[in-house]
Image (tube, helix red, strand yellow):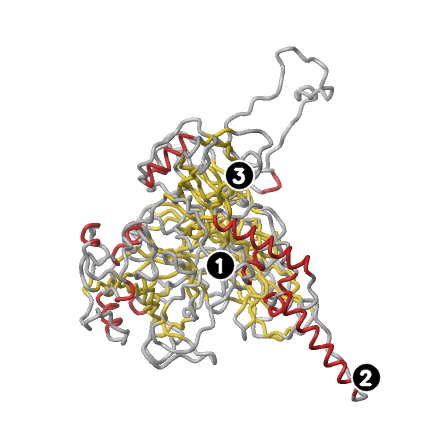
Amino acid sequence: MWTGSDQCELTAAGGVCGAHASFCFQSGSLAHLDLDPEAHLTPEEGPLQELPFTPVHAPVLNLGVNVSSSSTLSSRRSLARLSSAGFPEVVDSMGQPAEAVDPTEPLTFDPQSEENDSLQGNLLLLQFLAFTRVSESGVAPDWPRRVYFTFQLYRFPPVTTQPLALLTDQSEPMALLSDQSQSTAESLCLLTTVNRDGTTNSGSPGLELQFRVDRSFLRPGERRWFLRYLALHNLHVDVWDGDSLLLLGSTAIPLKPMLRQGKAAVQALQQLDVLTTDYMEEEPLGTSRDQGSDWPLNMHTVLRGQLHIRTGNIGLPVLPDQQRAVDTPPSHIVMQTSGFRGGSLFERNVTQLNARSSAKAQRPIRADLIGLQQTQDVRRKLSCMAAVHRKEGTQHTHTPQLTDSAQMSSPDVEQSKAEGIAHMLSRAITTEHPLFCSLGSAEYLEYVLRNPFNTAHTVTICSDHSELSVITSAEEWRYFKSLSHSPTPVEENMFHLQPGAPGPQVYLRPKESLHIPLKYQSFQCDPNTAPQGPSILPAGSGPQVAQRNPPHVVASRTIKVSFSTEDGKPLSILQVNVQPTPHIVDQTFRLYHPEQSFLKKAIRLPPSGGDLCDGTQVTVRCSDPDVVCQTRKTVLGEPQDVYLKVPGSSSPHVRMFFIMVYTDKWMAAPSQVWHVYVHFLECADMSVVSGQKSCQSLVLRGKRSVKKLRCYCSHPQDLQVEPGGVFVLPPAAVQEVQVKVQPWRAGGRFFYLSAVDVEQQRLVSSWLLCLTVHRPVISKAFEVSVPVGEGRGSSRKISYTNPYSGPQSLRLHSDQPHLLQFREDRFQIGGGETYTIGLRFAPSQRPGAVEILVYVNDLQEKTEEAFCVKVSYS
């Protein structure tokens, strides 16, 4: 109601909010630097001393570090809704329901209980059940309509789910909600898979993913590390909008409730906050960028929704063909093998392994297996055939000719014999050893080298790949022996490093055996990334088993380490068959930056990292050699940041790399592995005034084929895109995209736009819109006092006079609509007339003060007047 005794007219406190400052410079007050470097130099002068300086980068914080506060139990109303929705039940191998675990209660991890479990296999379950929308100003109540998720669990490949629709019940899509004040339980939407034609599946809702961890998946001695991963790690999940392909936010799922602790099966229902980070530069009152001042950069955490997920673990018995000892790690000591192991001199593999015979290996195999006598028999038969043809008068008939292989001369055969003998001798002194490795982790092994001669030799050790090297430092050798629990002794000053030598040298006495320490460590990975968008999976609501094909892993390779005497003859050869395996990802970061420019960012180490916060020197390595990654020593107790400098690429390219964080001196194993995605976007800069609509055109260029596109924006309240619907972009054509911006807060803002192929659900182009928003010129300022704790607001009114001679149609806006509303959002006023604007201030339960801007705009959203209302809640 707008009639009452609490209405009174606001009085203007002043015409202009602000003041002009004048600066006076005197002609002798500035000291000029001498440009002559030789002038006024004294012997004490030298290079400048560097002061302690920390680069100012807005640190990126992982929102999933402390998940105990974001993981809560669902309400009873939500639980009743989920239980009646028809989601698949979690049962053990005997068909009994899994035991429910409360994720909010502390769980004690007993390694001995897990070791003694008769069910050594584990079937991990992730059931995406529902998503709770959070109402935001300027966002449609049915946003988002579809979502999909990306994550990586343990050593499994990264998962990109199919799009999931948000439903109010099991069959009907959620209608537009007219009541914005609905409760959280009423906005809970069930998730269901979507068919290729866009319709939702009529079966059971939700999406279930299965990850089988048994003895066929685990390496020897890995089971205890897998259990440690469940006890100490969280699963980082990115939530995406299925229509715009823009990132909604991220969450972290505690994996500790998946520990069975001797039970047949366990399950836990969790409600997790989906959070995102929004950066905004606030413009202080009375300042502008023209005065040379920097606006402070504030980082805001925005709640985008809540994810309802069920985690489970079903114990599996060990199959008969999997009976092997996996709890004992393999030995790090490699014994040298010797002796001839048999084989043919002209085996096909001998020809393939010989470098000089690689060209001959492409000839027919038959010619490589026949002898010289067989070649002569073939020549005699062909001659007889030619004679018969001549006798029958068929001289023009084609006569078969000997192939190049059949015409092999006797010297070629002798050369092949010599090469085969040399290869067999090399195989007789070669020891093969399989090596399973992961990104950033050092694999240690000791090779037992024996001198079979009665004379001493100085042996040179040479590796054909830099990732497999000899440990020459006794301190480093002692450290790796302690990690591997190797009982062999450490010898000081064992290796001789001669300049110009292909590798370190070691002295061997007659008939002596030595343990040569070796280390393999790789920082390389496959940098290719999949196109941004949900995965296209077959329709169906059944469980989906995770694949085990490892992406981002380099191919298997063979590395040879040769041990040669002084005359260059090989004494022994160690052939290491490297088999890379997927690695564990602790955290995932997604950064957005303008294209073709360097990204400089700081990632802050989590404070609850154990050895990361006790002053230990932290070392970082990056899988991308073009990315600069470093950290600096900090004062004890202060947070430590990892600084990145990433070269730019064109839009919409995504640069992917891994960062390994080490806390030990010799970088034996990373304490954390970060997966970093840098999305490079086209950049558009705009300088606008708050409350006023501004336009800018963007160009979208066609590709090789016809595409049906649609443009989306990250802030629908402040940003509008035209064309707003689906449009066709022909090949090599140019489409103009009109962007209309109307922000309500002064400062720096960052908006995101995306052009999506609606048929293939793939990102075609993306933009980063960097806004510099200035405050409008304030024509009048008012003050009002609103009582606190009365449960009702306060009504006021102000007058507006039309300065024009003709009539006007005007609109009213507020930069904080949750605090101030108008009696009428638009009105008409004649020339020179005065109109009374009715204001209604919302009640408050806490005292304080706030400034609210009132915009009087025309129909084209150009600001005619701007008022500042200072509200004091007391």
Of the image marks 1 and 3, the number of the one nearer the N terminus: 1
Count of marks overlaid on the render: 3
- Rounded to the nearest angstrom, the CA distance separating label 1 from label 2 is 47 Å
Q: Judge left or right: residue 800 versus residue 595.
A: left
Q: Which residue is mark 3?
A: 564
Pointer 1 local density, CA inside 10 Å: few below 14, some 14–19, many at least 20: few
Q: Nearer the viewer, residue 428 or 66?
A: 428
User: Which quadrant holds the N terminus?
Assistant: bottom left
Of the image marks 2 and 3, the number of the one nearer the N terminus: 2
Q: Nearer the viewer, mark 1 or mark 3?
A: 1
**Residue appearing at x 45%, y 33% in the figure:** 454
Q: Which residue is mark 2?
A: 395
- Rounded to the nearest angstrom, the CA distance separating label 1 from label 3 is 25 Å
State the residue lying farthest toward the top. 43
Q: Judge left or right: residue 851 versus residue 267.
A: right
Label 1 amino acid?
Gly
Q: Which residue is mark 1?
A: 343
Label 2 amino acid?
Gln
Residue 411 % position (x, y):
68, 57
Q: Nearer the viewer, residue 470 or 173?
A: 470
